[in-house]
Image (cartoon, rainbow, N blue to C red):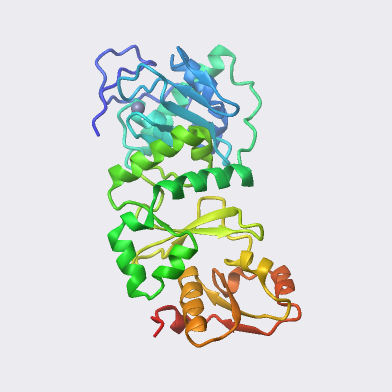
């Protein structure tokens, strides 16, 4: 994407890329700068972006400087790292505070990070000049469980398994399609533009700040880990979604990813305990697809057994042992099982 932008710091009306002079006050440590730039409203103010801005509970939505934007569509929200993240629901650009400064100055954040820091330093100096750097750091922004469930539900509603023929074919090939359908599995579209549209629609429904803080968005277009397209909702005992894991098709690494900051706190399949008999046996396997596969096998062979999944032997939490009290337990963490197709 090409960005023509007139830099508000230099008064340059030409736009385009420019060299940034860092010689005045070179505080070029990324962590120090992130702290100085912690308040999106102060940064937006220093950059002249507060005209027409809308404040949410934790977020700020401004007119996007990267595309012609009559109504504010760029949402900035505090991140867990102490800085902030942003996404524009008009043009699809997104990132953190350094990406923002990089785009403003026509810099490549990966190739020219030194220049980006220098440009960020100029913004920080301007904050000091306006006396706005004394603001308290933004509150931590881990999304509540209820809010995450709302976001995940909105994603699943739009990411229908039936609409992704290749995912359907993959699950059918693994012999677990019906099981996946029962478990509410969804599928992201393959096309990044379609993923982007899905995110925009979800943001419309649940709010941009909730989507940003869900850990599902990446720093590029579409979802973080855009090729991990199989959506696997993990539920708690009350069948509320606690996280939304995603698996890649075939065995593209990483096979399984969780939303940023929202890993497995419970085994997969824990909701099945609510309706189980107290003495029903339990099998513990690795990975959600293996849970499906073993459930299919159990049913086929008349085995009466609950199946739950964990991310691997190292993900085991000692308190989960309570789940097995009074039950026979089969632990199958052998990697060889992972590739098997139930027959
Ligand atoms: Zn934009």
Residue at horizontal 71 percent and vertical 72 percent from the top:
323
Residue at horizontal 34 percent and vertical 20 percent from the top:
69
Foreground residue among 232 and 218: 232
Residue 59 position in % (x across, y down)? 54, 28
Residue 74 position in % (x across, y down)? 42, 27
Q: Is residue 227 left or right of residue 238?
A: left
286 lies above or below 32: below
Residue 285 position in % (x across, y down)? 54, 77
User: In terms of image quarters, where does ligand 1 lie?
Assistant: top left
Furthest toward the bottom, the residue is 301
Foreground residue among 34 and 261: 261
Q: Is residue 232 left or right of residue 250?
A: right
Dividing the picture into quadrants, the one containing residue 249 is bottom left
68 lies above or below 227: above
Residue at horizontal 34 percent and vertical 30 percent from the top:
103
162 lies above or below 317: above
What is the count of numbered marks? 0
Residue at horizontal 41 percent and vertical 72 percent from the top:
176
Q: Which image quarter holds the C terminus?
A: bottom left
81 lies above or below 336: above
Tell me if I can see residue 84 in this picture: no
Residue 266 position in % (x across, y down)? 63, 63
Tell me if I can see residue 316 in this picture: yes
Q: Which image quarter holds the N terminus?
A: top left
Dividing the picture into quadrants, the one containing residue 319 is bottom right
């Amino acid at each position: 994407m090409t960005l023509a932008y007139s830099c508000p710091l230099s008064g340059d009306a030409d736009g385009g890329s420019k060299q940034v002079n860092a010689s005045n006050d070179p505080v070029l440590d990324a962590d120090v700068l992130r702290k100085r730039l912690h308040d999106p409203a102060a940064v937006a103010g220093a950059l002249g972006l507060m005209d027409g801005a809308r404040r949410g509970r934790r977020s700020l939505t401004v007119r996007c400087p990267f595309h012609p934007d009559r109504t504010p569509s760029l949402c900035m929200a505090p991140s867990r790292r102490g800085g902030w993240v942003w996404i524009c629901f008009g043009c699809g650009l997104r990132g953190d505070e350094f990406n923002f400064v990089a785009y403003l100055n026509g810099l490549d954040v990966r190739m020219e990070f030194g220049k980006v820091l220098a440009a960020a330093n100029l913004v920080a100096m301007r904050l000091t000049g306006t006396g706005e750097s004394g603001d308290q750091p933004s509150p931590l922004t881990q999304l509540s469980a209820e809010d995450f469930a709302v976001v995940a539900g909105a994603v699943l509603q739009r990411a229908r398994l039936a609409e992704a023929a290749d995912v359907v074919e993959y699950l059918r090939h693994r012999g677990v399609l019906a099981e996946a359908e029962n478990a509410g599995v969804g599928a992201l579209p393959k096309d990044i533009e379609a993923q982007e549209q899905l995110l925009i629609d979800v943001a419309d429904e649940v709010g941009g700040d909730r989507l940003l803080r869900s850990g599902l968005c990446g720093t590029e277009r579409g979802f973080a880990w855009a090729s991990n397209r199989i959506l696997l909702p993990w539920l708690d005992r009350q069948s509320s979604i606690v996280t939304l894991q995603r698996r890649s098709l075939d065995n593209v690494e990483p096979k399984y990813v969780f939303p940023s900051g929202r890993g497995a706190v419970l085994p997969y399949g824990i909701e099945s305990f609510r309706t189980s008999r107290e003495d029903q046996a339990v099998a513990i396997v690795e990975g959600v697809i293996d849970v499906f596969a073993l459930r299919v096998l159990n049913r086929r062979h008349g085995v009466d057994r609950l199946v739950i999944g964990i991310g691997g032997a190292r993900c085991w939490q000692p308190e989960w042992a309570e789940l097995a009290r009074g039950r026979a337990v089969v632990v199958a963490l052998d990697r060889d099982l992972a590739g098997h197709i139930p027959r």
